[in-house]
């Protein structure tokens, strides 16, 4: 298991990388979003970003703007959004990403009939999958909640499109999230990447681990039973220290205190935990 952190798109990307590097994260998840991580801006700052990545030996995963529709009711608007997805895929490849995550549709499904919403999502995700593949990127689809795209909808998607999943544990724990165990019962084999953060089990708060009501230790145990890949801590606290604390908590839960302390002693001899 390796642990990553995601940039706040309102902040300078190279500075975000340096912050996570100093905190000892293992890789960087680049969310390609306005205003500071828009594709044009990234291309302008390409050298600084690449230098920061290589100085911390960071691999990169890409993340698409969470608010980009994948099943917009107006086809010309969806086409324009797909164009922007492709620009983001191009930018992701420039920084060496091999996987990119996009969210399920975020517009309320009441805007168009459920069947239409689901069919459009499946058709468009299939299209975007091909666009990503042509660039050497593997596209992953992330769960948000049942109103956005339910477990039943995901089942239909996976029966028609061969695509992996980014399992967002925090999202699964919200009141409309359908529960981690239900996702795991169905899609274990699809999980290629994980997002982890805490909440009050009602809304999507992206809290530090332990600051909400999620049984984080149990979630970690469930993950560890079948998964040993990338876990990005999507903790959106204003005080970034909570990212470091969340990382320590995750490592402690994953490895147990003894192994955690041995790992720390190996990496930072003499430093008290
Ligand atoms: Zn997420």
Image: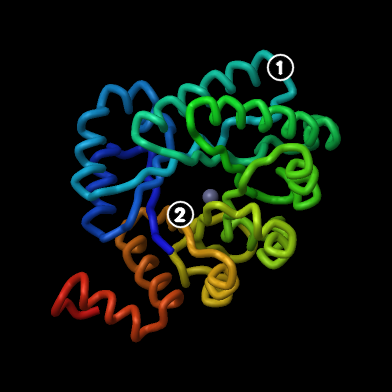
Tell me residue 11's x, y (percent): 31, 39
Q: Nearer the viewer, residue 104 or 107?
A: 104
Would residue 38 appear left or right of 222 to someone viewing this image? left
Q: Is residue 77 visible?
A: yes
Disc 2 under 8 Å from ligand 1? The reply is yes
Q: Residue at x 52, y 53 (%)?
A: 193
- Coordinates of residue 219 in the picture (x, y in percent): 57, 71
Q: How many marks?
A: 2
Can you say whether 270 is above or below 143 in the image? below
Depth order, front residue of 13/158 = 158
Residue 232 spot, x, y in % from top left: 44, 55
Type of colouring:
rainbow
Residue 218 falls in image quadrant: bottom right
- Residue at x-position 48% and y-position 59%: 229
Q: Residue furthest bottom?
A: 258
Outermost residue on the left side: it is 270
Quarter residue 255 falls in: bottom left
- Rendered image: mark on residue 241: none
- Please give the residue where the numbered disc 1 appears in the rendered image: 75
Q: CA distance from mark 2 to mark 1?
A: 32 Å
Q: Quadrant of the C terminus?
A: bottom left
Tell me residue 148's x, y (percent). 71, 43
58 above or below 128?
A: below
Quadrant of the frame with the N terminus: bottom left
Q: Is residue 173 left or right of residue 88?
A: right
Q: Residue at x 35, y 71 (%)?
A: 248
Residue sitting farthest toward the top: 76
Q: Secondary structure at mark 2?
A: loop
Q: Quadrant location of residue 180?
A: bottom right
Compared with residue 237, is residue 63 higher up or lower down, i.e. above or below? above
Q: Which residue is mark 2?
A: 234
Q: Is residue 213 visible?
A: no
């Amino acid at each position: 298991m390796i642990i990553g952190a995601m940039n706040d798109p309102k902040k300078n990307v190279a500075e975000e990388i340096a912050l996570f590097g100093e905190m000892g994260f293992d890789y960087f998840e680049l969310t390609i979003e306005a205003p500071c991580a828009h594709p044009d801006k990234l291309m302008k700052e390409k050298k600084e970003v690449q230098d920061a990545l290589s100085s911390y030996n960071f691999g990169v995963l890409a993340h698409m703007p969470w608010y980009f529709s994948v099943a917009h009711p107006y086809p010309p608007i969806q086409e324009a959004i797909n164009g922007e997805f492709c620009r983001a895929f191009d930018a992701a490849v420039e920084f060496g990403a091999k996987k990119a995550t996009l969210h399920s549709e975020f517009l309320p499904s009441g805007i168009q009939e459920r069947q239409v919403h689901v069919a459009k999502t499946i058709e468009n995700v299939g299209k975007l999958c091909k666009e990503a593949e042509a660039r050497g990127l593997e596209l992953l689809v992330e769960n948000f909640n049942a109103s956005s795209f339910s477990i039943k909808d995901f089942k239909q998607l996976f029966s028609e499109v061969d695509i992996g999943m980014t399992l967002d544990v925090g999202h699964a724990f919200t009141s409309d999230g359908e529960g981690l165990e239900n996702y795991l019962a169905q899609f274990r084999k699809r999980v290629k990447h994980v997002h982890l953060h805490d909440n009050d089990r009602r809304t999507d708060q992206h809290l530090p681990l332990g600051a909400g009501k999620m049984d984080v230790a149990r979630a970690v145990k469930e993950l560890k039973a079948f998964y040993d890949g990338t876990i990005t801590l999507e903790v959106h606290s204003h005080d970034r220290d909570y990212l470091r604390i969340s990382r320590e908590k995750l490592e402690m839960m994953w490895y147990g205190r003894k192994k955690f302390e041995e790992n720390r002693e190996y990496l930072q001899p003499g430093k008290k935990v």
